[in-house]
């Protein structure tokens, strides 16, 4: 009934109804149908509650094991209150949802120990530590707990079990269990940690366990020991090298001796850095124990070395000195240690220099060279000197005296005492640096040291100690053969004026660089010595120059001849010029000027000193040389231009082909020799410049015949017109000669303009007549203008007929009112040529030139003009002129007009010649037309006959052709089928 009406009543209402009547069986069956499809915690709990109250224990156990929807806390409390005889439902709930301590307490309180054993052994051995902890809280007998633990044994997790027992201070309870695990070979760290804690608590020889057991965790056990026995904690930490923990526990308990021993034994740089950190408040206490106990007890060099290094790294020099004194000076096992002695001295050098000398005197087994160098770097010079002296390092010792203490006298005394060559060498170098050249050379000789000869030479030269230098170089020559040494020896001989020794030395075998020595002697004006060297080496060039310096000019010329070098010749030549030895200078100069590159230099040198005549004499002598070249001829020409003008033109004409004309042109231009300059321009084909020079400097340079030859060859057209102006201004009488020469090159229009502007147009009439054939407008107009002015109408008419390129109308207008009738006739003629027919006819009629008027009308081709002229003649009663006009203008006058005018003016007789001519002409034309018509008819008939013949011929060939045959079968299937 509940299932049927639950939808109307609701599940909650049905549950309340069952509970109201305490019908748990009904509720059990009602909820069972909804359990699988519901996740409502209340339904699951009500189902568990109903099943428990109706005795359905198995169903309660199943639901608590499988369901995830019920409320665990509420279910646990219900099951504990229900106290079911079967505890498995409660075990399921508490195991799944972490209520193991509550479960254990419930089971132990209700004396259900077998369920505890079953849960631990079968359900969940991993929760055994929680069970044991709760049992200990419930004061359960230890035997039961031990038995419970042993029953699980290896399945039991040790770490949580130990934690539970340790919380309750009941670790001894696990002694049998742990020993059993160890006997079975367990290496579990937690097992051994727990066993160690038990041994420590029981004080059962814990040190033996801590030092021999390899499996326990040192940090865990050490931490456990700290409050019980710190020394045991130190043992545990040392075994596991737990540096931080050990340092903390020893600092906290003032166990600095143990800490010092551990740190020394550990030999760890990081650990040393930590304990020696300035921020460590216990550092001084630790250092005291290290110095007084730990290191003196140590027998390991590695431990000592690590400690020393740590002190050095921590920058504790004073503490390090204290430490090393304890080790080295107090007869320990390391008293003679080489490294420690070195370190003690080095540290004292750095930290406490007052102890260094004492250590140097007391210690013997240290690195003397290295320590000495460190002492020098630390400015402990006396200590360094003592160290080097103690180890017989005499060179280093004397270097300290020289370089650091700077006491040369002590160094000299030390050198005399040890009598070592190397020591003397160092002393000598120092003396050399201090400028004690003589003393240094003496020391070098005592040291028999030839290695520093370069420095000695330089110092001796700077100090002018050549006498001592000779002694030193003689010693050096015995030990080595160096060109520098032999060269310097010769130089030293020269400086002290021992020329005989130089001659003797160079005759002996030597490796001196004689050329270099000679140059050096020459540069320093030691000419006598240089002369010996140059003569011996046959260096004639240098010898010549040296002899010049000695004023031995003849010998210098002889040496230059042997050298045969342009440079040498020049130097000797110039020296002779300066000394006014011109004969010797000319000998040298003749050998120089044959070289093109040196010629100008010689010329300049002579001219700068005013020796012009001697230079010209030298150049004239050079013309006859076999090797004479263009430069000599050119330079002589330049000299003539400057100093002897009268010889210049002759020289140019004689040697024009051997001159450098451009250079001589520049010289002539500078000296203003215009005639010679023009001649040079012509020879060099510079006709433009030649023409310009002639026109600019005509008083000296102009020659008419020469100028005509020049002007036709110029390239610049403007020069033509410049020449026209030039002749117009200076030589107008021969201007036509020049114009005729240039006629083919001139612009005639421009020439006419020039002459017109100058007002001398008639001056060039011959030229214009000569060029009028070119039919140039300007020329034509100029000549026509001249003809008009001269009233030369014949030449004017000829000019107009032959040359029509001019302003015809302008000329006609200009002369149509001329007083001469012939001039007016020319004007009418011009109008006729220009097509101005009316003006020409009117002008002719005005002057009664009827013939000219009729010819003009005929040439015009204008019928109206011709007929007007006829009327004019009728009006004037000129019957003969009327008849003449009909004949002259025959082609223009219409017959009907002519007959009408003649009939009306009673001039029929004068028209008959015209009429006869006209009738004859018409008859001829008719005859020609008839003849042409007959010939055309004949041609048409002949053409038609030819066409008929062609048609007949075609028809005849068509009859001879065979008839067309049908195609064979199968051949024309795809062809055309007739309809």
Image (cartoon, grey):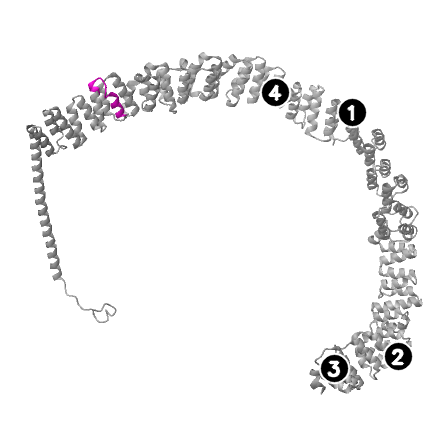
Viewed as shown, does residue 206 lie left or right of 667? right
Residue 629 appearing in the image: no
* Lower position in the chain sequence, tag 3 or tag 4: 3
Q: Position of residue 44 (x, y in %)?
A: 75, 80
* Lower position in the chain sequence, tag 2 or tag 3: 3
Boundaries of the magenta span: 807-823
In the displayed image of the protein, which residue is found farthest to the right? 203
The residue where tag 1 is placed is 438
Which of discs 3 and 4 lies nearer the camera? The answer is 3
In three-dimensional space, the C-alpha distance between marks 1 and 4, rounded to whole angstroms, equals: 35 Å
- Image quadrant assignment for residue 880: top left
Mark 2, other Cα within 10 Å: few <14 / some 14–19 / many ≥20: few
Q: Nearer the viewer, residue 879 or 771?
A: 879
In three-dimensional space, the C-alpha distance between marks 1 and 3, rounded to whole angstroms, equals: 136 Å
In three-dimensional space, the C-alpha distance between marks 2 and 3, rounded to whole angstroms, equals: 39 Å
**Quarter containing the N terminus:** bottom right
Q: Nearer the viewer, residue 71 or 486?
A: 71
In the displayed image of the protein, which residue is found farthest to the front? 904
The residue where tag 3 is placed is 13
Viewed as shown, does residue 844 lie left or right of 275? left
Mark 1, other Cα within 10 Å: few <14 / some 14–19 / many ≥20: many
Instruction: Give above or below for 504 relative to 356.
Output: above
Q: Is residue 624 magenta?
A: no
Q: Position of residue 216 (x, y in %)?
A: 85, 65
The residue where tag 4 is placed is 543
For the stretch drawn in magenta, the main secondary structure is helix
Disc assigned to residue 109 = 2
Residue 636 appearing in the image: yes
């Amino acid at each position: 009934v509940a299932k049927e009406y639950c939808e109307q009543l609701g599940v909650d209402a049905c549950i309340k109804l069952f509970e109201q009547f305490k019908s748990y069986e009904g509720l059990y069956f009602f909820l069972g149908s909804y359990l699988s499809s519901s996740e409502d915690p209340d339904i699951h709990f009500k189902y568990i509650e109903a099943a428990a109250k109706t005795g359905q224990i198995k169903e309660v156990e199943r639901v608590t094991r499988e369901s995830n929807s019920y409320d665990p806390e509420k279910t646990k409390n219900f099951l504990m209150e229900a106290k079911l005889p079967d505890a498995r439902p409660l075990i399921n709930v508490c195991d799944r949802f972490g209520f193991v301590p509550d479960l254990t307490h419930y089971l132990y309180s209700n004396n259900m120990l077998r369920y505890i054993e079953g849960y631990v052994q079968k359900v969940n051995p991993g929760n055994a530590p929680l069970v044991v902890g709760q049992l200990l809280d419930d004061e359960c007998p230890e035997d039961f707990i031990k038995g419970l633990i042993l029953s699980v044994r290896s399945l039991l997790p040790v770490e949580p079990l130990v934690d539970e027992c340790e919380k309750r201070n009941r670790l001894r309870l696990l002694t049998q269990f742990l020993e059993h695990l160890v006997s079975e070979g367990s290496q579990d760290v937690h097992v051994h940690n727990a066993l160690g804690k038990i041994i420590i608590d029981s004080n059962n020889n814990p040190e033996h366990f801590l030092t021999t057991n390899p499996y326990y965790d040192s940090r865990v056990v050490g931490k456990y020991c700290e409050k019980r026995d710190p020394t045991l904690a130190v043992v545990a930490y040392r075994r596991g090298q737990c540096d931080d923990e050990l340092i903390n526990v020893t600092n906290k308990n003032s166990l600095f001796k143990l800490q010092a021993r551990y740190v020394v034994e550990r030999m760890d740089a990081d650990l040393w850095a930590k304990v020696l950190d300035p921020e460590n408040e216990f550092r001084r206490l630790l250092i005291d124990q290290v110095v007084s106990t730990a290191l003196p007890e140590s027998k390991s060099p590695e431990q000592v070395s690590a400690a020393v290094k740590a002190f050095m790294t921590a920058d504790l020099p004073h503490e390090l000195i204290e430490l090393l004194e304890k080790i080295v000076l107090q007869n320990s096992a390391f008293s003679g240690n080489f490294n420690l002695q070195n370190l003690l001295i080095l540290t004292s050098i750095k930290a406490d220099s007052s102890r260094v000398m004492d250590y140097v005197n007391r210690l013997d087994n240290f690195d003397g060279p290295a320590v000495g160098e460190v002492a020098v770097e630390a400015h402990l010079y006396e200590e360094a000197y003592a160290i080097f002296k103690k180890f017989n390092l005499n060179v280093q010792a004397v270097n300290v005296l020289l370089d650091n203490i700077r006491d040369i006298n002590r160094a000299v005394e030390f050198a005399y005492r040890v009598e070592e060559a190397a020591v003397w060498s160092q002393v000598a170098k120092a003396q050399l640096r201090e400028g004690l050249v003589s003393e240094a050379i003496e020391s070098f000789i005592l040291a028999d040291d030839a290695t520093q000869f370069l420095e000695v030479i330089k110092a001796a030269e700077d100090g002018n100690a050549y006498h001592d230098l000779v002694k030193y170089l003689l010693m050096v020559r015995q030990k080595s053969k160096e060109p520098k040494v032999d060269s310097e020896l010769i130089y030293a001989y020269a400086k002290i004026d021992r020329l005989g020794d130089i001659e003797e030395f160079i005759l002996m075998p030597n490796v001196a660089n004689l050329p270099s020595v000679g140059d050096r002697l020459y540069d320093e004006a030691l000419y006598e010595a240089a002369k010996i060297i140059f003569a011996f080496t046959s260096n004639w060039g240098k010898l010549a120059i040296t002899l010049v310096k000695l004023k031995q000019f003849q010998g210098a010329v002889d040496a230059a001849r042997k050298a045969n070098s342009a440079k040498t010749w020049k130097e000797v030549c110039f020296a002779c010029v300066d000394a006014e030895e011109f004969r010797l200078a000319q000998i040298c100069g003749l050998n120089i000027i044959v070289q093109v590159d040196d010629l100008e230099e010689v010329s300049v040198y002579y001219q700068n000193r005013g020796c012009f005549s001697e230079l010209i004499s030298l150049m004239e002598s050079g013309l006859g040389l076999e090797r004479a070249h263009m430069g000599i001829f050119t330079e002589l020409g330049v000299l003539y231009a400057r100093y002897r003008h009268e010889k210049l033109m002759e020289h140019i004409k004689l040697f024009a082909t051997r001159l450098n004309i451009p250079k001589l042109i520049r010289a002539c231009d500078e000296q203003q020799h215009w005639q010679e300059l023009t001649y040079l321009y012509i020879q060099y084909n510079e006709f433009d410049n030649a023409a310009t020079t002639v026109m600019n400097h005509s008083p000296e340079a102009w020659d008419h015949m020469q100028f005509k030859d020049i002007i036709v060859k110029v390239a610049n057209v403007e020069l033509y017109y410049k020449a026209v102006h030039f002749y117009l201004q200076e030589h107008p009488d021969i201007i036509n000669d020049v114009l005729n020469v240039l006629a083919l090159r001139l612009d005639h229009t421009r020439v006419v303009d020039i002459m017109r502007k100058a007002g001398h147009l008639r001056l060039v009439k011959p030229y214009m007549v000569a060029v009028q054939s070119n039919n140039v407008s300007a020329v034509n107009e100029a000549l026509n203008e001249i003809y008009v002015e001269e009233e030369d109408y014949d030449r004017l008419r000829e000019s107009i007929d032959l040359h029509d390129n001019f302003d015809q109308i302008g000329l006609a207008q200009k002369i149509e009112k001329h007083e001469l009738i012939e001039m007016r006739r020319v004007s009418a003629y011009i109008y006729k040529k220009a097509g101005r027919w009316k003006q020409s006819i009117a002008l002719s009629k005005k002057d009664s030139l009827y013939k000219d008027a009729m010819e003009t009308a005929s040439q015009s081709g204008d019928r109206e003009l011709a007929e007007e002229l006829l009327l004019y003649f009728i009006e004037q009663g000129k019957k003969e002129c009327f008849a003449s006009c009909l004949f002259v203008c025959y082609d223009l006058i219409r017959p009907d007009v002519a007959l009408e005018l003649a009939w009306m003016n009673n001039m029929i007789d004068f028209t008959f010649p015209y009429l006869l001519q006209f009738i004859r002409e018409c008859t001829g034309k008719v005859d020609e037309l008839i003849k042409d018509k007959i010939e055309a008819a004949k041609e048409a008939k002949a053409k038609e006959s030819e066409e008929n013949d062609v048609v007949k011929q075609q028809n005849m060939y068509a009859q001879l052709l065979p008839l067309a045959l049908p195609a064979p079968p199968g051949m024309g299937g795809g062809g055309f089928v007739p309809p």
